[in-house]
Amino acid sequence: MNRTASSLGKDLVGLEHLSAQQLLTILDTAEPFKEISERRIKKVPVLRGKTIVNLFFEPSTRTRVSFEFAEKRLSADTVNISASGSSVVKGETLVDTARNLEAMKIDMVVIRHGASGAARFLAERIPSNVVNAGDGRHEHPTQALLDLLTIRDNFGRIEGLKVCIVGDILHSRVARSNIYGLLKLGAEVAVCGPPTLLPRGIEQLGVTVFKRIEEAIAWADVLNVLRLQLERMQAGFLPSLREYNQVWGVTSRRLEEAEKEILILHPGPMNRGVEIDSDVADGPHSVILDQVTNGVAVRMAVLYLLAGGEPERAEDAKQGGEA
Amino acid sequence: MPDPQRRTVMDEAAVRRALARMSREIVELNEGTASLVLMGVRRRGVELAEFVRDEIERAEGVRVPQGTIDITLYRDDLLTVGPRPVVGETELPPEGVDERAVVLVDDVLFTGRTVRAALNELMDYGRPSRIYLCVLVDRGGRELPIAPDVVGREITVQADETVEVRVPRLDGSLGVDLVSVPTEAQ
């Protein structure tokens, strides 16, 4: 049995620098964790005595709650810190905040921050494990992992599938992490969205660009429909929500024209009637709530894998054999 | 190729005889098969539990429910050994474990720490009326106050030896070996 300790290293900052094997290790480890959430006592003692700080500089309900459930079901002690109502608003820097937490003897930090690179910045400066829960436009690795798990649950594989990410690719860390993860696991990846919301040169990542949603639907096995951030309207990227829905919306009428079943993912929270229609979101091929369930399992797996001892100590301990 | 470091102490026939006797002892201890549930401890305990179930069925005509238990997340050495990337799944029989006489089936009883972990995990699933511990080999060396109820064979093991149980699906054959381990190269 492969017993390499801490197979992810100290931190999970993004999927860009993980190997396919590491991604598969996380997905495989998530499988048994699904069952724990079905138990009457939804808790295993594996992270007992570990202290985890959820440091959220941006508003988040779903991701924070999902991490918190994952932590609690592994028996870790958790503290939530959000930007409003903390010393952050008093002008403390990120590193000072983290060092103060370190001084209180913590083991892990889950960080959500508006600045790209914030997670790596923190990871390089504190000894605790750092998990990126979304940093600026950079990455949101656990979201992509739960998307990968959900896709694999439905097809039994990821390799060879055609996955199209639809919407605001430019501002989306979900899109970036998904592209890295899907390509490493052998999927074909495309993006589709308004030209103002596609990053220039995105093809260089190895993805196809569709200029019309109908073409994307005709091609894809899976559509990952991103949330349209409504503040993009003020910034002048889009003329109107109504027009967005008419041109780019994933509607049942458009899906019916494809002569196959397409799996529908959405990272939430949804703007019903904008990027996705209600009958699609609630339809038979939508796995949006499965994604939420898988999110807890995937985060449990990541926390569990990061929590292990240092590799050298693991080697020493192996000499003792097992009982 | 014969392995000079490996010596068979129970061949297939010996293991089968031991399992047949152990199955009778379980039924005797429990005064019948009512409310019995077998829980094989992953990984080798799972196959041994299947043998025990088949033996009980042969003798009593009753197929007792069987589940498997994976204790990875209940180990006490995560921080020293590091996480196991392969976490197995625990599967309860549909009857559950509440008010059941649960038999934990494992291959080797050594320090007792695996059993401690399995007991904690079982308690998280429910409230068995009784838990029995059934092991194919008791090799001594307990670090916790845990004793088996049903034992296939007690084997004295030297400091540089370990006991390895072979089961058909995982290892291709059924038997028990004593393996001497050079201390530096393990």
Image: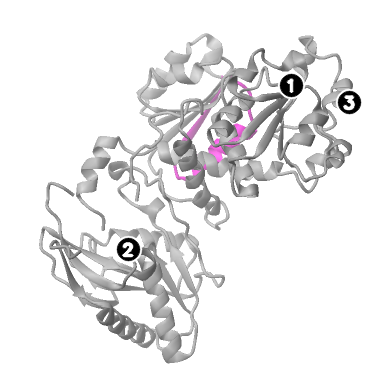
Magenta-colored stretch includes residue A79? yes
Q: Residue at x 36, y 88 (%)?
A: B28
Question: For residue A158, which numbered disc appears in the image?
Answer: none
Establish if A38 lies above or below A168. below
- Which picture quadrant has residue A136? top right
Q: Residue at x 24, y 41 (%)?
A: A315
Q: Where does the image place residue B72, in percent across and percent down from the top left? A: 39, 53
Amino acid on which disc 1 is placed: Gln
The residue type indicated by label 3 comes to Gln
Mark 2, residue position:
B115
Which amino acid type is marked by label 2? Val
Q: How many marks?
A: 3
The residue carrying mark 3 is: A246
* Residue on which the image places disc 1: A229
Q: Which residues are magenta?
A: A58-85
Colouring method of the image: one colour
Q: Is residue B12 visible?
A: yes
Q: Quadrant of the C terminus of chain A?
A: bottom left
- Residue B111 image offset from top left, x and y in percent: 23, 60
Q: Is disc 1 placed on a helix, strand or loop?
A: loop
